[in-house]
Image (cartoon, coloured by chain):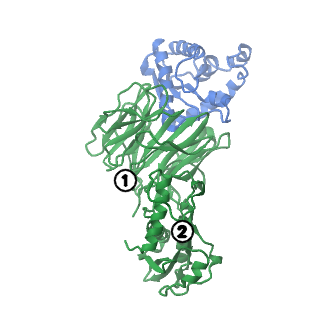
Amino acid sequence: MRLHKDTRMRALAFLALLALLFGLRGAAAQTEIDLTGGRITPLPIAIAPFLVGDGAEEGGATMTAVITNDLGRSGYFNPLPPDSFIEQVTDFSREPRFASWRQIQAKALVTGQVFMDGGKLRAEFRLWDVNTQQQIAAQQFTTSPKNMRRIGHLIADIIYKQLTGIDGYFDTRVVFVEESGPKDNRVKKLAIMDQDGFNPRALTDGRDLVLTPRFSPNAQEITYMSFAGATPRVYLMNIDTKQREIVGEFPNMSFSPRFSPDGQKVIMSLQDGGNSNIYELDLRSRGIRQLTNVPSINTGPSYSPDGSQVVFESDRGGTQQIYVMSVDGSGQTRISFGDGRYSTPVWSPDGKYIAFTKQARGQFAIGVMKPDGSGERILTEGFHNEGPTWAPNGRVLMFFRESGGESGGPQLYSVDITGYNEQQLLTPQFASDPAWSPKLN
Amino acid sequence: MKTSVHFKIAAAFCCVLALTACSKKNTPDLEATTVGQAAPGSEKDFAVNVGDRIYFAEDQSTLAPEAQETLRKQAAWLSQYSDVTVQIEGHADERGTREYNISLSARRATAAREFLIAQGIDGTRISSIAYGKERPVAQCDAEQCWSQNRRAVTVITGGAKTS
């Protein structure tokens, strides 16, 4: 990674701030970051409108907008308004006049150009450190014009990583349940969209009730619950071909599925009378293994990223609480001991946290705790927040928030792991049960 | 889809039941106005004169005395009309998380099913399905609505007389 010293210092300071916020205590935070209220002070960044060749006008405008929106929504960047720019970039290959960017307080500058090249769109960008007057990243992409938004996300991911040291999450998608119709007869469809809410499309027609879609690690397949047959079951669907199959013919309902980190297994709950227990099914051998065997509700299983452990919820102690066990089912240990009911646990992609839904005093909160149950932090709380899912870099959580009453319904929100920067993700209809994809590139 | 037909039927019964909804118990004089319209052994007879649903306390699946009384009446009716098959739909209110509510509603349907079996109804006549919080009947956001949504509904799937 080519990173100039001063920029590295700033990146380190930025990381140090993150470390402080996460209680990790790194080096002392430096001057550029404002610690007031524990908020991350977003880095001022100027994104110059991309220069365009003939036929690439839409591509240039789209990429500039996508990059600006991605970086701004992350909460770690403050894209400066273009009408404040003193220099108008007119030549991509010439070095910018840094003094004019410093004057508007920009710490970093993005320049780019897009042109048509034999039916393909060719995009190039450069990231400049304004203080050191150095180019710190540059790349070019050639692609079909229909991928112009994706290229914007890829460029935003590179900028994010260069300036924070953390992998970006912009070139990702979200699968969710799109809800329409009256509350007592909701139509629910599986749907997918880009992480910024663009390109939404339905994956099912709404005839069958569908719930809890989850991505496979290869991002081309999802597992979900459907009421299509006489008995509600766990299914797999290929997102591209829409081909679907039932995961195992069991005598009773199967539900709450999730893929293993290697994509070879599905872990889920099987109902048996008034109880539900957790089973792991090998997708190749179709062999099934029982992990819990307790006369209670055991559901919501989620693997640790190394696949060695499983976190789940159980009411074996009287109310819903979070437990961790080895992937062979041994050592089932309760980890949640706060005041309230804990459910829908999801292990973070970096293995450091477990996100959950918590019900206490009539409120539904989203929070995180460490896998040993310590360090519980509530990120958002209100009438009804449910079902967190992690961005692949483990910095952002998405969940759904339900408003009560006859006309109420669920909508998607995201929040930074610090609890700041809560953002609604606009969807054409009501939306619930979001699941974030792995990185696509 | 088979179930959507059931919902429509259930919704139609709700309208009838609404007449008696001022008291939680069926009020005899109001019932009298509808008895004449329901042929004995019909779905309507079952819903109006027996009662097709029972209610549960928050996060519970135990059968309250009132629920047991309704289930005893259901069992008596099912004994009388032995060709009838039913599906018990378990439901939860919206004040819980999705997967847990699916399981909780399965537990409620199972409790009702096992009670009917204990009353002598052949288990092969009774299937069950768990809807979690996906199909509320009452839509306000207050306990009076949530309590109506914590229910198990016995839906006739075959063998009833046509009214």
Instruction: Indicate whether B45 appears above or below A117.
Output: above
The residue where tag 2 is placed is: A66
Output the chain of dot 2.
Answer: A
Q: Position of residue A337 (x, y in %)?
A: 48, 33
| Coordinates of residue A240 in the picture (x, y in percent) | 41, 58
**Which residue bears the numbered disc 1?**
A217
What amino acid is found at the position of numbered circle 1 in the picture?
Pro
Q: Position of residue A43 (x, y in %)?
A: 55, 67
In the picture, which quadrant includes the C terminus of chain A? Answer: bottom left
Count residues near mark 1 (Cα–Cα under 10 Å), then give few for <14, some for 14-19, many for 20+.
some
Q: Colour of chain B?
A: blue
* Quadrant in which the N terminus of chain A is drawn: bottom left
For label 2, the crowd category at 10 Å Cα-Cα, with few meaning under 14, some 14 to 19 and many 20 or more, is many
Q: Is residue A123 visible?
A: no
Give the Cα separation between the discs numbered 2 and 1: 25 Å
Q: Report the amino acid beneath label 2.
A: Val
